[in-house]
Structures are given as C-alpha cells and as structure tokens.
Image (cartoon, helix red, strand yellow):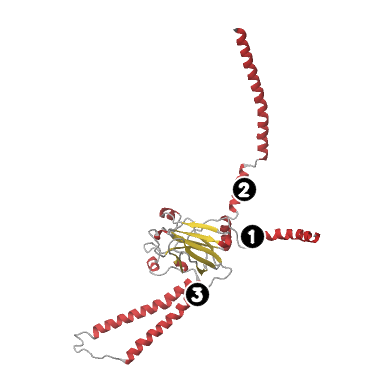
Amino acid sequence: MKMGQMHTRMKIATLAALAAFAALFAQVPAVAQDAAAQATAPDAGMIEAVSEAAATEGSYTPMAPTKGKGMPTDPRSDEPGAMAKSLTFQDQYTDNGIYALGMHDYILLPVITVISLFVLGLLLYVIVRFNRRANPVASKTTHNTMIEVVWTIVPVIILVVIAVPSITLLARQYETPPAEAVTIKATGYQWYWGYTYPDHGEIEVVSNMLPEDEAVRRGEPGQLAVDNRMVVPAGVPLRIQTTASDVIHAFAVPSLWFKMDAVPGRLNEKLLTIKEPGVYYGQCSELCGSRHAYMPIAIEALPPEEFAAWVKAQGGSMPGEEAEAAAPASEEAAPEQVALLTAR
C-alpha cells in the first residue's frame, strides 16, 4: 500500500516538473514577441497626430448660417425692421433675383400704388359729386369719346411698360447653362430630397429635416434645417436638374429666386449662379402629400476651394483629376509600347 502511494507521488512530482519546464520555455518566445511589438509599434501620440492630420486634410466643416440671410424674417423678432421685411421678398443673392426684386420695387409696386390710389380717388369723387342729394337730376350721358380714348390708351401704355422687363426676366430665367456648369440633380421623394453630383464621382446625399429642437441648438431656423445640405460652389454656374420618384414636387429657394417643378419621369433643368457664400433655405412648393410641409431645402454655397474639400470628404473627385492621374501612367507606358512595336 505504501509502495503504491510512493509511486503515485513520484508520478505527480515528475509531471509537475515537466509542466514547469514547458512553461519556462513557452514564456521565452512570448517575451520576445512583446519586445518586437514594442520596437515596431508607433507611439500612441504619433497615431493621434497622424489621424488628426488625415482628418484635417481635405476636411469639411458645415457653414454656420447668417441670421436674416437666405431665410424668412420673423415679424415677432426684435430685429430692426423685422415687420417691414416680412411684408416683402427676401434679400436676393442671384442676378435674376436682384433684377426681379428691382422690377417689383421700382416698377410694379409704384404702378400698382398709383392705380389703386387713382381708382380710390375716382370712387370718392363719384360718391361726393354724383349722390342723390348733390345731383337730384341724374345725367343721361352715355358716351364720352375723350374718356374712352384715354382709358384705352393709358392701360396699353402701362402694360407695355410692365411687359418689357417681364419678358426680359422670363428670358433670363430660361437661359441655357454653359457647358462648364456644375451639374447637380435634385430628386424629390415622399418626403425628403436626394442630391446627386454626376460631375464629381456620382456623390449621393440624402437630406431630411432636422427636429426643431436640434435645429435651434445648431442656430438654424426650425423646420428649415436639414441633416445633410445641398453643397454647391459660389460664383460658379450651376446646372440644377430636378425630377421626382413618386409624385410632383417643386424645388424652391426664395432668396435665390429659384423655383422648378420636380416631375416623375421628367428631367427639368435650369441655370443657377449664387453670388456669394452662405446658407439659403427653401421648401417643397408643390402639395405632395401628408408630410409636404416637412421636406425643406438647405443650400450651402461655399468658395470653390472649400467645395473641392467637401467633394473629397464625400469620397468624390473634381473634374479632370482622374484624367491627370491617368496621364503619367499613359506617358510611362508609351515608350514600352513603342519599343514593343519596333521589336515586331
């Protein structure tokens, strides 16, 4: 009995010694691997610096909107002249918008005011001069050649005065975009907008309305702010194309004097050139369903170099970059092709 126990204890001691010996040799390569990893691994601070540099290069930061620019004015605000500004059009930031606003302020509004005051004066004159007490015997005059000539010629002159700038504005609004214009396709959905950039690697942006509390937190107007804006270069001709996937929508931005229907199965096109950088807000202007009021438009116009940074941040490319990258490769391959042809 004692001999059996002794053999068992010897077996256990032998196995423990073998296990300790194996563990000792197993630690040697592990320590070597840790040392090699520490020698080759970059410093943590260096990694953060490289990451920040990569993020900064070609980075894009959304532009903060300017209060009162490109957005409706709240008549209840404390801004000076807020009530008066709310009774007229927004300030315009395109050439067509400036022309149209000038036509309204300096032609249409004065003509309408003069005609309204003139008609009001005639009504008051008739009430006072031709009432029953002042004129007991009613006049039986049926014709007056001079009056008939005047009230025919004067309206014609007024219409001609209005027609000349109106036709000019219509022609300006349907000017064909130049060949070098930046193409952006806006597609209306129920109920959001999608923007495609075919000239920049087919970038696609989906734009939904932000909750009002989030918009206010960002310093943007409620029910007009979006999560992803339509970003464009300022001072550059834009070819805006509109279509829809379901029902008729309308792409409208009042401060840019731009409005165009988005019709399913049809591609409408219009020229737009934004004069200066800024954030400009609009909305769908076609009754398109139960959430029609919740598909706003936000256009962010950036300087061209910042727009290029946005394109790179979205994974796109500027026109000509692919051709420039392919040119050196083709130049290097050309001598090899010539040598191959010569050998043949």
Asked if residue 8 is positioned above or below residue 126 in the image, the reply reads above
Amino acid type at image mark 1: Glu
Task: Return the mark for residue 88.
Answer: none
Instruction: Say which residue appears at 71% left-offset and 60% top-offset.
Output: 330
Residue at position x 50%, y 69% in the image: 94
Residue wearing tag 2: 50
Q: Residues within 10 Å of mark 3 (few under 14, many from 20)?
A: some
Percent x, y of residue 80: 40, 65
Residue 153 in which image quadrant: bottom left
Along the viewing direction, whichever of 153 and 319 lies nearer the viewer: 319
Q: Residue at x 39, y 79 (%)?
A: 111
Per the rendering, the mark at residue 322 is: 1
Q: Does residue 139 sit above or below 212 in this rendering?
A: below
The CA span between labels 3 and 2 is 50 Å
Regarding mark 2 in the picture, which secondary structure is present there? helix
Is the C-beta separation of discs 3 and 2 under 8 Å? no
In the picture provided, is 112 more to the left or to the right than 325? left
Pointer 3 or 1: first along the chain? 3
Mark 3 vs mark 2, foreground winner is 3
Q: Which disc number belongs to residue 172?
A: 3
Query: Disc 1 on helix, strand or loop?
Result: helix
Q: Residue furthest right?
A: 343
Disc 2 residue type (three-letter): Val
Figure quadrant of the C terminus = bottom right
Single out the residue that lies furthest toward the bottom: 145
Q: Percent from the top left, x then y, of residue 287?
A: 39, 64
Quadrant housing residue 160: bottom left
Instruction: Look at label 3 and name its amino acid.
Output: Arg
